[in-house]
Image (spheres, grey):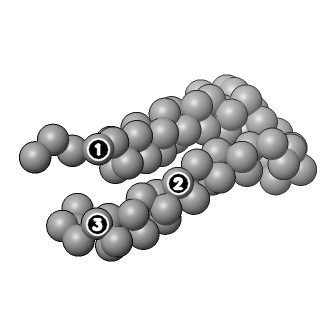
Amino acid sequence: MAKNPETRSQVRGWLLFLLLVPLLVLYVPLYNTIEPTLFGFPFFYWFQLAWIVASMIITAVVYYGTEPRRE
């Protein structure tokens, strides 16, 4: 991450916007369909399960990106 405190806070601000990405799963018409299926599961179900993993990764990136570092 950048060493300049002002630049560091700007990067942290952009990282916090990543937390809005998992909110896309709340827009149900985006994935309200049966096809394509994955291992017999309709798209509606496996898409939601994929978002659980994606949300965990996004949250971890934001957490570790905004956590104050020891110097």
Q: Mark 2 falls on what kind of element?
A: helix
Q: Is residue 35 in view from this perspective?
A: no
Residue that label 1 marks: 68
Q: Amino acid at mark 2?
A: Leu
User: Residue at point 82% right, 53% down?
Assistant: 30
Measured in 3D between alpha carbons, the distance from the residue under mark 3 to the one under mark 2, in whole angstroms, is: 17 Å
Q: Mark 1 falls on what kind of element?
A: loop
Mark 1 or 2 closer to N-term? 2
Q: Which one is in front in this view, the residue at disc 1 or the one at disc 2? A: 1
Q: Mark 3 falls on what kind of element?
A: helix
Residue 51 % position (x, y): 60, 38
Which numbered disc covers residue 5? Answer: 3
Mark 3 or 2 closer to N-term? 3
Q: Is residue 55 in view from this perspective?
A: yes
Residue that label 2 marks: 16
Indicate the quadrant containing the N terminus: top left, top right, bottom left or bottom right: bottom left
Measured in 3D between alpha carbons, the distance from the residue under mark 1 to the one under mark 2, in whole angstroms, is: 14 Å
Q: Is residue 53 above or below residue 9?
A: above
Q: Amino acid at mark 3?
A: Pro
Residue toward you, 69 or 45:
69
Write down the quadrant of residue 45 in the picture. Answer: top right
